[in-house]
Amino acid sequence: MKPQLACFERLGPPGWEALAAARDAAAEAGLIFLADGKRGDVPVTAAAYAQALVGSTPTPWGEVTGLGADAFTANPLLGRDALEPLVAACEAADAGIFVLVRTSNPGAADLMDLPAPQAPLHERLAAMVDELAPRLLGDGGLSGLGAVVGATEPEHIARLRELMPRSVFLLPGVGAQGGDPAMLGAAFGPGPAGALVASSRGIAGAPDPAAAAAQLRETLWEISNG
């Protein structure tokens, strides 16, 4: 389950209650709860974000537990020092983090594809992810420090997989944004566990959501085992 936090936060306290209920429902169903908030700020604030998402906050009245997400998304554009508290919190909580590397929106090219200076900025971000990946490395060889890589620009995926061989890719943009799941094979270089494909509106807005989900699952199973 990948709830977009903004859709809950805009509702104020009732939205947070609904988010907590969604978290509990995901746990009961045995699903990963991936909080999509794209958090990122200076280190002291990043640490507070980490407490809110996967940790807890000490108070004079005891520890106040945060959301308890299994993983969350993060914005790396403030630099490595701003990522450090988020990664450290994931180490402590046995949680995962997906760092924005090359997003699915058309405007991503405005910044993420600019030379910086020898290669596009998204490749520099990928190198930073790979440098940090050993901190959350699992027994199977994949890291809990993953990367958000948009499915709408599949020409970048093979190169980014070369740069981040240990990271799980979170691939948004399939369906409503026009991403073609058949073009995502390179993301599954490490095997079927190498990528997660997000298609929220593509499934929810289909005439038969269950059939749309089944078709997407079948396509991804074929390419991930190819």
Image: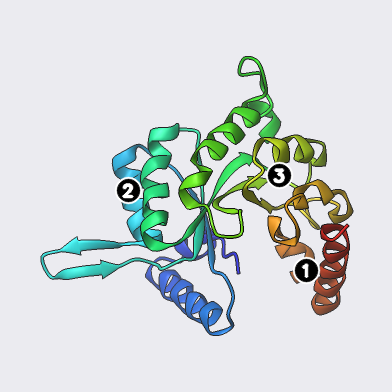
Label ID, residue 203? 1
Asked if marks 1 and 2 touch (Cβ < 8 Å), the reply is no
At 67% from the left and 35% from the top, the residue drawn is 163
Q: Give neighbour class at mark 1: few <14, some 14-19, many 20+ (Cα, 10 Å).
A: many
Q: Secondary structure at mark 1?
A: helix
- Closest to the observer: 150 or 125? 125
Label ID, residue 185? none
Label ID, residue 104? 3
The first of marks 1 and 2 along the sequence is 2
Q: Which x, y percent locates residue 141?
A: 61, 54
**Of labels 1 and 2, the one closer to you:** 2
- Closest to the observer: 141 or 64? 141
Give the labeled residue for mark 2: 47
Q: Give neighbour class at mark 3: few <14, some 14-19, many 20+ (Cα, 10 Å).
A: many
Does residue 98 appear to the left or right of 194 in the view shown? left
CA–CA distance between discs 3 and 1? 17 Å
